[in-house]
Image (spheres, grey):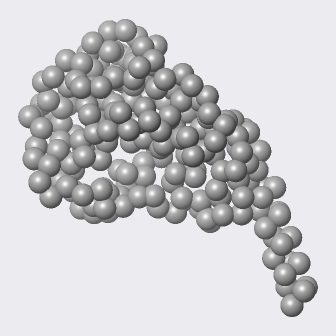
Amino acid sequence: MKHSRALAATASAITFVLLGALPAAASPPPPPPVTAALTSLEALPIAPPGSSAGYDRELFPHWTTVSGTCDTRETVLRRDGDQVTTDAACRAVSGSWFSPYDGITWTRASDIDIDHMVPLSEAWKSGASQWTTERRRAFANDLASSQLWAVTDNVNQAKGDKDPALWRPPLASFQCTYARSWVDVKFRWGLAVDDAEKTALAEMLATC
């Protein structure tokens, strides 16, 4: 029994070392440049926001397992943080995270939210209500695009489910990247924009 416990402890320690102190990739996959974003913006279907009737976050299952004990949230914390150390359960126990929305750096993972660039409710109202659950799951856990961002928790809460006509990042220098990312996600996933949203996106892209 003692030998089994020792082996388990050793395995946990090895896992900690393997996952610990990871260098930062610093951001999600970069969105296309502004010229491509403008082209994609013009190609997006324009439609008024759909109804929120029937919407529930549980219809977008997240966070899903990515590898081993790591789910999507922990994967983004490791990806976007600097010198992130994790435990055997893949929980971030130390590191630092720069929030591009407001330019603040945090040293506790509990101060960080993983933001869906295009919020789940916004996606629902712009086309995702017609998707299968599996497609909504893929959208909510999309690591291949600029959909998921590690940001200050209360800034993310202020954003809520607002589109760019109603909310923009307080750090003005990030608004170009924000608009490029928003357009990228909507274009990839075939989601619509409304007139006010399109105008706000074009205004932010003009700052690039």
Q: Is residue 1 above or below residue 20?
A: below
Q: Residue at x 41, y 20 (%)?
A: 170
Q: Residue at x 84, y 81 (%)?
A: 5
Residue 135 visible, this angle: no
* Residue 91 found in image quarter: bottom right
Residue 31 visible, this angle: yes
Location of the C terminus by quadrant is top left
Q: Residue at x 11, y 54 (%)?
A: 53
Please name whichever residue, 200 or 95, is drawn nearer the observer in this view of the structure.
95
Location of the N terminus by quadrant is bottom right
Q: x, y (%) of residue 87?
A: 72, 58
* Residue 115 found in image quarter: top left
Q: Is residue 183 above or below residue 203?
A: below
Q: Is residue 112 left or right of residue 129?
A: right
Q: Residue at x 34, y 33 (%)?
A: 159
Q: Is residue 13 left or right of residue 77?
A: right
**Can you name the residue that lies furthest to the top here?**
207
Q: x, y (%) of residue 24?
A: 67, 36
Q: x, y (%) of residue 126?
A: 18, 42
Q: Is residue 11 above or below residue 48?
A: below
Q: x, y (%) of residue 152?
A: 50, 34
